[in-house]
Image (cartoon, rainbow, N blue to C red):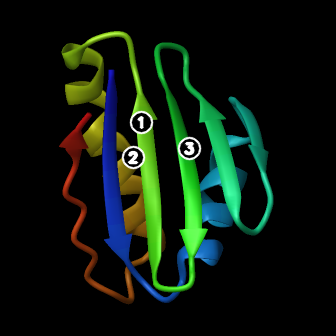
Amino acid sequence: MDSIATVPTENASRYLQQLCKHWSHKLEVEFDAIQGRVAFPTSAVRFDAAPHALTMTLAGPDAATLDRMEPVVAEHLRRFAFREELAVDWVRG
């Protein structure tokens, strides 16, 4: 199952890199300035930075995993983006 959130921001690349660096201490992570991927034990999130938005695609085996991980990813993004109020609205695919 997938869940996608497209978050309007002018700082998508910066947040993508901060999130990936943060999780790289304990998880398998790959990233550059435009794309990133974090492998959690039961799911994975892909980040795609565009000039005016950060798209986050969360993949997990079931709805319960997505229910658990959506707020984790969103809250970490909000911590790094404390200077702006970001709306993170997940849409299940």
- In the picture of the structure, the residue carrying the numbered disc 2 is 73
Q: Quadrant of residue 72?
A: top left
State the quadrant of the C terminus. Answer: top left
> Measured from the top left, where is residue 60 in percent x and y?
39, 19
Q: Image check: 69 left or right of 92?
A: right
The nearer-to-camera label among 2 and 1 is 1
> Measured from the top left, where is residue 25 in percent x and y?
74, 39
For the point 55% across and 24% down, which residue is it? 40
Disc 1 packing (10 Å; few <14; some 14–19; many ≥20)? many
For the point 46% across and 85% down, which residue is it? 52
> Measured from the top left, where is residue 51 in percent x and y?
56, 85
Compared with 58, 22 (above or below) is below
Q: Image check: 64 left or right of 22?
A: left
Q: Secondary structure at mark 1?
A: strand
Looking at marks 2 and 1 on the same chain, the residue that comes earlier in the sequence is marked by 1
> Measured from the top left, where is residue 64 in percent x and y?
20, 15
Q: Nearer the viewer, residue 91 or 67?
A: 91
Q: Amino acid at mark 1?
A: Leu
Q: How many marks?
A: 3
What is the number of the mark on residue 58?
Answer: 1
Looking at marks 3 and 1 on the same chain, the residue that comes earlier in the sequence is marked by 3
